[in-house]
Image (tube, rainbow, N blue to C red):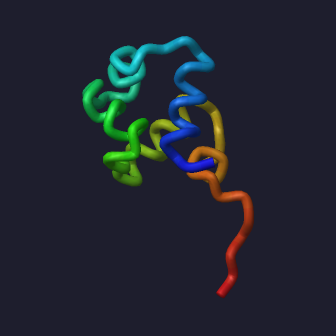
């Protein structure tokens, strides 16, 4: 599942508005809207903050399910 879908699923699963999630992780509601629409991707620091807030792994949040070894 792509990041923007995971974020939407996690946020709505906890019945949070975009504004409330933004407040809790220290960003603007406009940022959350852009992330969920796929128009932008947050910086790594913010992805880590989101994963910690929801208590999920970075792999789960970003849709990575397999270890890729070159």
Say left or right for 62 vs 29. Answer: right
Say which residue appears at 65% left-offset and 38% top-offset: 56
Q: Quadrant of residue 28?
A: top left
Question: Height in image: 16 above or below 39?
Answer: above
Say which residue appears at 32% left-offset and 48% top-offset: 40
On the image, the x and y values in percent for residue 21 come to 41, 21
Question: Height in image: 65 above or below 11?
Answer: below
Most extreme residue toward the right is 66
Question: Height in image: 57 above or below 53?
Answer: below
Q: Nearer the viewer, residue 27 or 1?
A: 1
On the image, the x and y values in percent for residue 20 come to 39, 15
Say left or right for 25 vs 31. Answer: right
Q: Quadrant of residue 66?
A: bottom right
**Count of numbered tags:** 0
Say left or right for 12 vs 38. Answer: right
On the image, the x and y values in percent for residue 32 come to 35, 32
Say which residue appears at 29% left-offset and 35% top-offset: 31
Q: Nearer the viewer, residue 53 or 8?
A: 8
Question: Height in image: 33 above or below 48?
Answer: above
């Amino acid at each position: 599942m792509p990041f923007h879908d995971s974020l939407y699923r996690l946020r709505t699963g906890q019945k949070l508005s975009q504004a409330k999630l933004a407040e809790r992780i220290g960003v603007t509601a406009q940022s959350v809207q852009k992330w969920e629409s796929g128009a932008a991707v947050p910086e790594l620091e913010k992805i880590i903050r989101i994963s910690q807030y929801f208590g999920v792994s970075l792999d789960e949040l970003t849709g990575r399910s397999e270890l890729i070894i070159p």
